[in-house]
């Protein structure tokens, strides 16, 4: 078990007072590390983060008339 999985298990134990109950739960906790890394790889590449003004324009364009 890697450091991340150990951290997840200890956090669950600390916050909820339980141990990972079964193998699927342990597997999903292990997969969480990959998911976090995938999202971190996208940081700075999304147009919403780079151009919030275009998001504001899109909101205004879809706004219903009063």
Image (cartoon, rainbow, N blue to C red):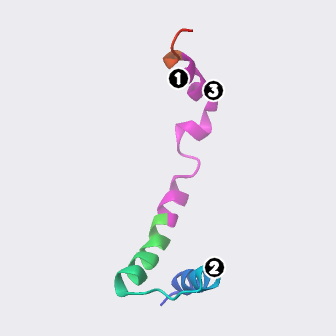
Residue 57 against residue 37 in the figure, above or below:
above
Residue 28 image position (x, y, % from top left): 40, 75
Instruction: Give the Cα separation between the discs numbered 3 and 2.
Output: 39 Å
Callouts 3 and 2 close, C-beta under 8 Å = no
Horizontal arrangement in the rendering, residue 57 relative to residue 31 (left or right):
right
Q: Gap between marks 2 and 1, in whole Å?
A: 40 Å
Q: Which residue is mark 3?
A: 53
Q: In the structure shown, which secondary structural element does the residue marked by tag 3 occupy?
A: helix
Of circles 2 and 1, which is in front? 2
Tell me what residue is drawn at x 49 percent, y 18 percent. 62
**Position in image of residue 17 (x %, y %):** 59, 86
Q: Would you say residue 58 sits in the magenta stretch?
A: yes
Read off the magenta span.
Answer: 36-60
Q: Which residue is mark 1?
A: 58
Quadrant assignment, res 50: top right
The label number, if any, that marks residue 15 in the structure image: 2
Q: CA distance from mark 1 to mark 3?
A: 9 Å
């Amino acid at each position: 078990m890697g450091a991340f999985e150990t951290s997840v298990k200890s956090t669950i134990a600390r916050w909820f007072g339980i141990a990972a109950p079964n193998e699927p739960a342990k597997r999903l906790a292990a997969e969480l590390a990959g998911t976090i890394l995938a999202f971190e790889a996208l940081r700075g590449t999304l147009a919403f983060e780079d151009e919030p003004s275009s998001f504001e324009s899109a909101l205004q364009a879809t706004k219903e008339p009063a």
